[in-house]
Image (cartoon, rainbow, N blue to C red):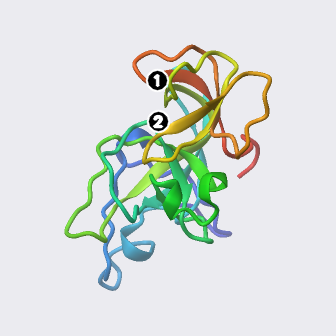
């Protein structure tokens, strides 16, 4: 987890941030977890990861906690739903800042609710860097900017050279194929956490 002084390190116990789904525990027993409510890493922590293509990407460890659930989509947008920046939802309507509250891309497409309606897991989201499989609006092509959409796990496209009306989710590097594009997530600076 780190050493004194406290320095958060990437604890990706599955070996892949796209498969992390640490169970949320509403009332953990004393001494069962390093962090509150089942988190294995300090909530909201930024970590860096090198993907299989050698790209450095910036991730945050957060609780996926939608008010209204939808089937998870890897590479789909998620939004900050609390002011501590530790919880996200797939719905912009849940966000504290609407479309401008975009947090990043959900990586785990297998996220499920366990044990009731309030037990969504801790996951990693990508907040900056290259991603070869981002959810895309129809007719997206290289250079276009995508930002949040009106429904869960949807995006809206702005043509290259036109300023997007909301905070950018990513800039596309390729044309859309099967609802996905290659691009660079721009929700945060890739720089220091």
Name above or below for residue 33 compared with residue 46.
below
Left or right? Give the position of 88 relative to 110. right
Measured in 3D between alpha carbons, the distance from the residue under mark 1 to the one under mark 2, in whole angstroms, is 8 Å
As drawn, the label of residue 180 is 1
User: In the rendered view, does 71 fall on the left or right side of 43?
Assistant: left
Local SS, label 2: loop
Residue 86 position by quadrant: bottom right
Of all residues shown, which one is farthest toward the left?
Answer: 115
Q: Is residue 16 visible?
A: no
What residue does disc 2 label?
Answer: 75
Identity of the residue drawn at 74% across and 21% down: 160
Residue closest to the eye, 152 or 113: 152
For disc 1, the neighbor class at 10 Å (few under 14, some 14 to 19, many from 20) is: many
In the image, taking residue 176 as reference, residue 14 lies left or right, namely left
Provide the secondary structure element on which disc 1 rests. strand
Position in image of residue 46 (x %, y %): 61, 53
- Total numbered labels: 2
- Rendering quarter of residue 30: bottom left
Give the residue drawn at x 29%, y 43%. 110
Tell me if residue 109 comes above or below residue 45 in the rendering.
above
Task: Say whether marks 1 and 2 touch (CB < 8 Å).
Answer: yes
Q: Is residue 66 visible?
A: yes
Give the mark nearest the N terminus, 1 or 2. 2
Vertical position of residue 132 compared to residue 169: above or below: above
Q: Residue at x 54, y 55 (%)?
A: 79
Residue 138 locus on image (x, y percent): 50, 23
Mark carried by residue 117: none
Of badges 1 and 2, nearer the viewer stands 1
> Can you give x and y, in whole percent of width and height, for residue 173 in the image?
63, 18
Say which quarter of the image contains residue 49: top right
């Amino acid at each position: 987890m780190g050493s004194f002084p406290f320095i958060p390190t990437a604890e990706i116990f599955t070996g892949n941030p796209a498969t992390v789904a640490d169970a949320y525990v509403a009332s953990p027993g004393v001494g069962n977890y390093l962090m509150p409510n089942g988190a294995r890493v300090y909530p909201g922590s930024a970590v860096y990861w090198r993907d299989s293509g050698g790209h450095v990407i910036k991730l945050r460890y957060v609780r996926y906690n939608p008010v209204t659930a939808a089937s998870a989509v890897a590479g789909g947008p998620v939004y900050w739903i609390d002011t501590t920046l530790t919880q996200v939802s797939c719905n912009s309507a849940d966000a504290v800042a609407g479309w401008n509250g975009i947090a990043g891309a959900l990586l785990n497409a297998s996220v499920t609710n366990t044990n009731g309606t309030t037990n969504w897991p801790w996951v990693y989201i990508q907040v900056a860097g290259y991603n070869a499989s981002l959810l895309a609006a129809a007719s997206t092509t290289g250079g276009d900017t995508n930002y949040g959409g009106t429904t869960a796990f949807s995006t809206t496209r702005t043509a290259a050279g036109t300023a997007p009306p909301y905070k950018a989710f990513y800039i596309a590097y390729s044309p859309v194929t099967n609802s996905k594009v290659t691009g660079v997530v721009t929700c945060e600076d890739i720089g220091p956490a």
